[in-house]
Image (tube, rainbow, N blue to C red):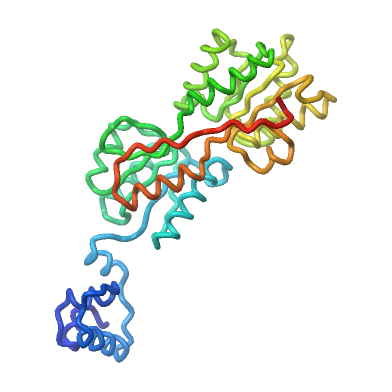
Amino acid sequence: MTNIKDIARLAGVSVSTVSRVLNNYKHVAREKRESVLRVIEEMNYTPNKNAIDLIRGETRTIGVILPYNNNPAFDQILNGILNKALENDFSITVLPSIYSKEKEVKYLQKLKSKLYDGIIIASRANDWETIIPYSDYGSIVSCEYTHHKEIGCSYMDRYSSYLDAFQMLKNKGHNAVAFTTARLESNSTKQMIDAYNEIFGELQPKYHISGCLCLEDGYEAAEKFLHLLERPTAIYANGDEVAGGIYLYAKSKQLKTPADLAIIGQENQPIGMGMGITTVDHQLMKIGEQACSLVINKSREKVKIPYRIVERDSV
């Protein structure tokens, strides 16, 4: 099988010259370029991508660690990453982790093996002390804030967004406020509880339900909340799909929004637009785009993406 050394020998040039031709570098003499291309055509040579990557010192491939690949919020981040990668002729490999620490480490080891130029972590299970050593082998960028200088990040200020959403509800006269979250042990859940405590005082456990990821979860959460003796007058859902489920349950009980129940969702998704649900838009697509740019540029910057509250009829 013909290899790059054979091409160099037959064309009468160096291996590095063949490499430059294969990578379409401009600074190659016309005669040498034509000689290399002629031999490639005569030998019907197809370059081995791994060999080219090794010579070039990069793969132009980025790994993206996602907990789930069917979650609207993570889909928004991934879409932003894909858009930016396409603009810059990079490939993306999705690495689903289901929040497994072992899977995350396995993916990070692929960075060490030079299978990727960098890795974007949309959400993590491991602590930073486990992740940081792998930054010696390529760019690692987080979609949440980290103060560690080895890790770049594209992030939004979730805590402030939660404060603003809860304050908006309080300003509209709501004091019995419930909320849903995805994972009980996550940093965003801790921030939401802290924000709630700051606005309303100590959280009553009955006003918080975790494990909510989809419309059906929202429907079930609303059923539990609205059967409480002291039922909430407002619910802040951790996603517009979850908020949609809450809305549908309330409607099935002939409750009107916002007169009987105010609802806020997150991430400005189509279902929220269609149902007229107020939402906290963390601009996740922009976070994905910026995260991808940081990897491409091998940057360890901390880039803050602004959030916005989109008010609709549900509050």
Between 308 and 184, the one nearer to me in the picture: 308
140 with respect to 201 (left or right)? left
Q: Position of residue 67 (x, y in %)?
A: 48, 41
Q: Residue at x 35, y 47 (%)?
A: 294
Q: Position of residue 232 (x, y in %)?
A: 70, 15
The image quadrant where one finds the C terminus is top right
Q: Position of residue 231 (x, y in %)?
A: 72, 13
The residue positioned farthest toward the right in the image shown:
254
Establish if 23 lies above or below 174: below
Picture quadrant of residue 239? top right
102 with respect to 12 (left or right)? right
93 with respect to 113 (left or right)? right
The image quadrant where one finds the N terminus is bottom left
Establish if 204 lies above or below 77: above
Q: Residue at x 45, y 51 (%)?
A: 94
Q: Residue at x 28, y 85 (%)?
A: 37
Establish if 231 lies above or below 70: above
Q: Position of residue 48 (x, y in %)?
A: 30, 73
Picture quadrant of residue 71? top right
Establish if 155 lies above or below 19: above
Q: Total marks drawn?
A: 0
